[in-house]
Amino acid sequence: MRKITLYFTGILCLIQLAISQQTTSGNILKLETNGILTAHLSYDRIFPVNEKSSLMLGADVIMGVGFAYGATGFAPEINVLLFGPKHFLEVGGLMIIDMEDDDPEEGAEISSPGLRTSYRYELPSGLSVGSSLLLLLDIDPPVVPTLYLGYSF
């Protein structure tokens, strides 16, 4: 009985995501950096759940700059987007996957699971600015603040 319940719950979630995808054009492209460790290029897709909350699925390409020079990673992520229509809170998780060889002499390794909390202000034109706080579980330093500029379309 439990498997059947989980199966139908999964199907209902997929149907909700499909309906949400058809009714929204919520795409976000962001350039995010903290200036001394990394620069991120991010794409997120928004799936509305109700008037004040949405599910965001996305991915980041992370390039090491400064102290993390030479590191390159890919980070799939899932976030919950709350409030709006101008001020947003994003809370979620990500998994950074190192895309470089494991040679320690070539650069820093950046593989780690993590948690993200972000604030974003979005203009009616789609331009957005925000800040994030990343809590990375396997990387030193474990807390990484970032600023970003984005565009919603």
Image (spheres, rainbow, N blue to C red):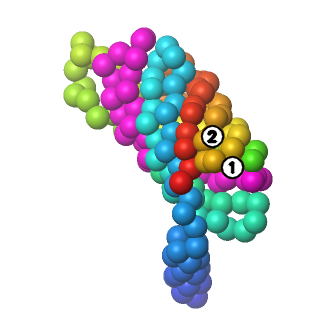
Residue nearest the viewer, comparing 143 with 86: 86
- Residue type, numbered disc 2: Ser
Q: Quadrant of residue 135?
A: top right
Q: Residue at x 22, y 20 (%)?
A: 103
Q: Position of residue 9 (x, y in %)?
A: 59, 79
Q: Residue at x 43, y 36 (%)?
A: 41
Q: Single out the mark in the foreground, 2 or 1.
A: 1
Tell me the residue that label 1 is attached to: 124
Residue nearest the viewer, comparing 22 with 57: 22
- Residue type, numbered disc 1: Pro
Total of numbered circles in the picture? 2
Judge whether 88 appears above or below 138 on screen: below
Residue 72 is covered by the magenta coloring: yes
Q: Position of residue 71 (x, y in %)?
A: 33, 23
Residue 149 is covered by the magenta coloring: no
Q: CA gap, disc 2 to disc 1?
A: 9 Å
Q: Residue at x 53, y 70 (%)?
A: 21
**Residue 3 visible in image:** no
Q: Quadrant of residue 47?
A: bottom right
Q: Main secondary structure of the magenta part?
A: strand
Q: Position of residue 93 (x, y in %)?
A: 56, 45
Instruction: Report the residue that reaches farthest toward the front.
Output: 125
Q: Position of residue 96 (x, y in %)?
A: 43, 38
Q: Secondary structure at mark 1?
A: loop
Residue nearest the viewer, comparing 66 with 152: 152
Q: Residue at x 38, y 22 (%)?
A: 64
151 sits left or right of 43 in the view: right
Tell me the residue that label 2 is attached to: 128
Q: Secondary structure at mark 2?
A: strand
Q: Is the residue marked by circle 2 packed among few (<14), some (14-19), or many (20+) residues within 10 Å? A: many
| Magenta segment boundaries in residue numbering | 59-85
144 sits left or right of 63 in the view: right
